[in-house]
Image: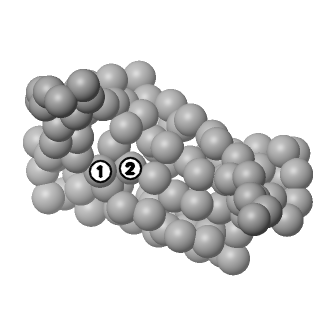
């Protein structure tokens, strides 16, 4: 079984921060339906993310990362992964996409 990290990207950043309570509930209901559909494929349900800062070469600047959250899932293969992503609520948000990273086991 392979594990994958789903990184939720939205170039406008935290559009959810300006949502009405009704819109937020509708969005969360869609996520709960998705979580229910994929069931045990979800290893870690994740959390929303907020880019705070970038640090490099001894300097810090304001964060500009379009990643707004993550989830870790498991699937037998890439075809099964595509089934998990079918109808994913993040993909219903305009200009959004999901970056999929396979978590590679390390032997030490």
Query: In which quadrant is the C terminus drawn?
Result: bottom right
Please state which of residues 84 and 66 is positioned toward the viewer in this rendering.
Answer: 66
Q: Residue at x 45, y 41 (%)?
A: 8
Return the disc, 2 or 1, that comes first in the chain's sequence: 1
Which residue corresponds to mark 2?
69
List x then y, in percent, for residue 81.
77, 50
Label placed on residue 49: 1
Q: Residues within 10 Å of mark 2 (few under 14, many from 20)?
A: some
What is the C-alpha distance between the residues marked 2 and 1?
Answer: 5 Å
Q: Is residue 36 above or below residue 69?
A: below
List x then y, in percent, for residue 57.
24, 25
The quadrant where residue 1 appears: bottom right
- Tell me, yes or no, whether the two marked residues, 2 and 1, touch with CB atoms within 8 Å: yes
For numbered disc 2, what is the local secondary structure? strand
The quadrant where residue 94 appears: top left
List x then y, in percent, for residue 41.
70, 69
Residue 34 shows in this picture: yes
């Amino acid at each position: 079984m392979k594990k994958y990290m789903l990184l939720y990207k939205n170039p406008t950043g935290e559009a959810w921060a300006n949502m009405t309570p009704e819109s937020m509930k509708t969005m969360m209901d869609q996520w709960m339906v998705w979580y229910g559909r994929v069931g045990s494929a979800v290893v870690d349900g994740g959390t929303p993310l907020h880019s705070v800062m970038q640090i490099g070469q001894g300097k810090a600047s304001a964060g500009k990362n379009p990643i707004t959250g993550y989830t870790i899932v498991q699937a037998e293969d890439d075809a099964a992964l595509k089934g998990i992503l079918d109808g994913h609520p993040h993909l219903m948000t305009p200009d959004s996409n999901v970056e999929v990273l396979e978590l590679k086991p390390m032997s030490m």
